[in-house]
Amino acid sequence: MKVMGFSQHGNYEVIKEFTIDDPKVSDLDVLIKIEMTSINTLDIMTRNGIPGFNFNLPHVPGSDVIGKIEAVGKNVKDFSIGDKVIVNTVYGCGKCYQCKSGYEAQCPLWQCLGLHVNGSYSELISVPHSSVSKVPAGFSDEELSAMPLHVPLAWRNIKKLAKAREGESILIRGASGNVGIFAILFSLALKLNVIALSGSPEKESKLKKLGKITVLSSNKSATELNKEILDITNGKGVDIILESFGSTLGNSVDLAAYNARIVSFGVLTGAESSLNVRKLYLKNISIFGTHNASKQEFDEALEFVSKNNIHPIINSSYNIKDASKAQSIFEKHEIFGKIILKNRF
Ligand SMILES: [Zn+2]
């Protein structure tokens, strides 16, 4: 089959077309002919190389899969050839304690499409049937292909872990990135008071068009920003903080209200942060660490976007053969919304 991938790490120019063997289909797998995927930061990280992580080269990036079932393993009963499906990005061994408890992302043998195994910049992909769902109605293919990695994460962070309640405040760092945009859309549907932090003046007006939210520039000094956020919350602090930056965790503890929930799911600005433990326990703050969502959360998230008519923001679409160019545009950080790749080789 044809794929777009890389045989050495480097900049976007290393993305080339290759031919590799078609994937094997085990008894519990489904083979999917991929129709579309979308670009995520993970694609750039894998292409650049991740310190301490050994890739089997050539490697095929891409985590989002929308397509049609091409073949099913002999023990698969819940899907038929031709079914249109969407795939949860992560799956586990299916046998261990974590998998059986519904926490596949915490399986010691967890697999993430486009990271541990070849991903979606390809004609075909074979995945366990347990990680696959039929697509929800009411969305374009482009919108569907923007969902698999980010939609369940937004759901898990805001609803499952932080247990957001109507009227609470939520602070979203990196709000103009794709995870941030989904988090804003989810928060508006849950009637939360959104404070969105963005480092891009050009994107602030675009963020404001998403709904009634407060947008602040993260380029201000920490002192100035802290004062603004405390003023907005009448001195109370923020109920929920989405912490994808890492190095700002200590600042999030400073900004948190009594009984606040902080969800840490990234280290975009650094993996080290010092925090005031006294504030942490005196304010009864909960800090959650998380990465990907379970299959159950994936399905709950899809149901939520469907019921609440939440549609991803699409920036642009490219043919998969232009994946190199599309990644170069993605990396300039000037885009707002998802870049879609159409798998037409
Ligand atoms: Zn497992």
Image (tube, rainbow, N blue to C red):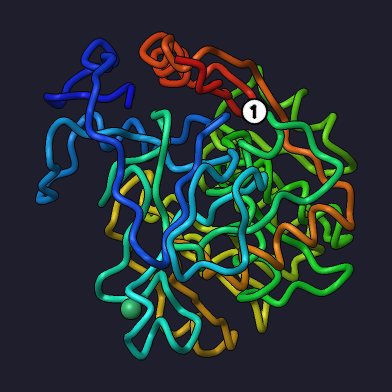
Asked if 224 appears above or below 14 in the picture, the reply is below
Q: Is residue 69 visible?
A: yes
On screen, residue 203 versus residue 276, left or right, reads right
Residue 266 x, y percent position in the rendering: 41, 54
**In front of the other: 80 or 264:** 80
**In front of the other: 88 or 193:** 88
Asked if 315 appears above or below 141 in the picture, the reply is above
Residue at point 44% right, 87% down?
A: 100
**Which quadrant of the frame does ligand 1 lie within?**
bottom left
**In front of the other: 344 or 206:** 344
Residue 325 occupies quadrant: top left
Name the residue tied to disc 1: 337
Residue at point 68% right, 29% down?
A: 142
On screen, residue 217 versus residue 330, left or right, reads right
Three-letter residue code for mark 1:
Gly
Return the residue found at the far front: 74
Residue at point 42% right, 11% down?
A: 321
Residue 20 x, y percent position in the rendering: 22, 29
Residue at point 44% right, 85% down?
A: 278
